[in-house]
Image (cartoon, helix red, strand yellow):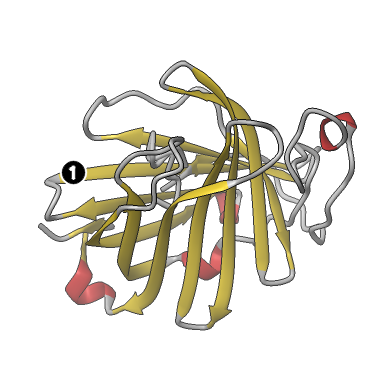
């Protein structure tokens, strides 16, 4: 999902695919979790094929994003968005579109589930560039919390990327994106609070209404 590239994601928005398996999520350790990596970082976290079933349908969101990343600044901007998500292949792939009306922008998230690794990959496509972000964040859910990580670049600077999803209750969720520039600390640069919406009012043919 790079929704900041997004990296969203969420935004938070994601693309991913594979075969059928249902295995509970857990956090595995790897060489990437020790030395040269920020707290919690691993690309071996796993999950289950139905991790994202919860997000199918329509959502109204409140987005908060740092105006400038990686400088220690705290000034942010707030804006609304709507999201419509559809399951494919029995839940092994999901596609959602995030529409940001005040930005006149949208993003597409593709999520795919690898049935051998029991792991999700999340990709982002921005309406600004039309390009699929080639580096997915990978991971899965343990209970109501999902974590997804990747090594990437932000305007030429090497970064570690973290997405977190929290299923607060049946109708509310929260997404966060953080980057680590120093392999020691995380800077949260984008958050989104989700509230379930009426798909007949919010979506049209599986996409957010304009």
Which residue is found at the position 53% from the left and 44% from the top?
111
- List x then y, in percent, for residue 184: 71, 38
Indicate left or right for 146 with 194 as reference.
right
Picture quadrant where residue 198 is located: bottom left
Q: Tell me if residue 139 comes above or below residue 209 in the rendering.
A: above
Q: Which residue sits at x=56%, y=32%?
A: 136
Q: Nearer the viewer, residue 17 or 170?
A: 170
Question: Is residue 205 in view?
Answer: no
Q: Residues within 10 Å of mark 1 (few under 14, many from 20)?
A: few
Q: Identify the residue under disc 1.
A: 105
Question: Within the image, what quadrant is residue 126 found in?
Answer: top left
Residue 22: x percent and y percent?
77, 58
Question: Image check: 181 left or right of 77?
Answer: right
- Disc 1 is placed on an element classified as strand
Which residue is at 82% across, 31% downward?
Answer: 32
Count of numbered badges drawn on the protein: 1
Would residue 129 appear left or right of 49 to someone viewing this image?
left
| Nearest the eye: 168 or 53 | 168
Residue 4 placed where, x, y %?
38, 39
> Splitting the image into 4 quarters, where does residue 58 fall?
bottom left
């Amino acid at each position: 999902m790079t929704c900041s590239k997004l990296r969203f994601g969420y935004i938070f928005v994601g693309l991913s695919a594979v075969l059928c398996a249902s295995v509970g999520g857990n956090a595995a350790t790897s060489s990437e979790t020790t030395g040269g990596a920020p707290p919690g970082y691993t690309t071996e976290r796993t999950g289950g094929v139905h991790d994202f079933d919860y997000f199918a349908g329509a959502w109204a969101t409140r987005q908060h994003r740092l105006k400038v990343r990686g400088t220690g600044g705290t000034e942010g901007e707030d804006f609304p968005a709507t999201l419509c998500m559809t399951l494919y292949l029995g839940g092994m792939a999901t596609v959602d579109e995030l529409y940001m009306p005040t930005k006149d922008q949208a993003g597409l998230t593709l999520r795919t589930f690898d049935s051998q690794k029991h792991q999700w990959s999340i990709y982002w496509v921005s309406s600004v560039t039309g390009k699929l972000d080639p580096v997915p964040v990978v991971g899965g859910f343990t209970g109501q919390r999902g974590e997804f990580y990747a090594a990437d670049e932000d305007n030429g600077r090497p970064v570690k990327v973290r997405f977190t999803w929290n299923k607060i209750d049946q109708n509310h969720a929260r997404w966060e994106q953080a980057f680590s520039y120093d392999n020691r600390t995380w800077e949260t640069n984008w958050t989104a609070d989700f509230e379930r919406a009426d798909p007949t009012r919010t979506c049209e043919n599986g996409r957010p209404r304009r």
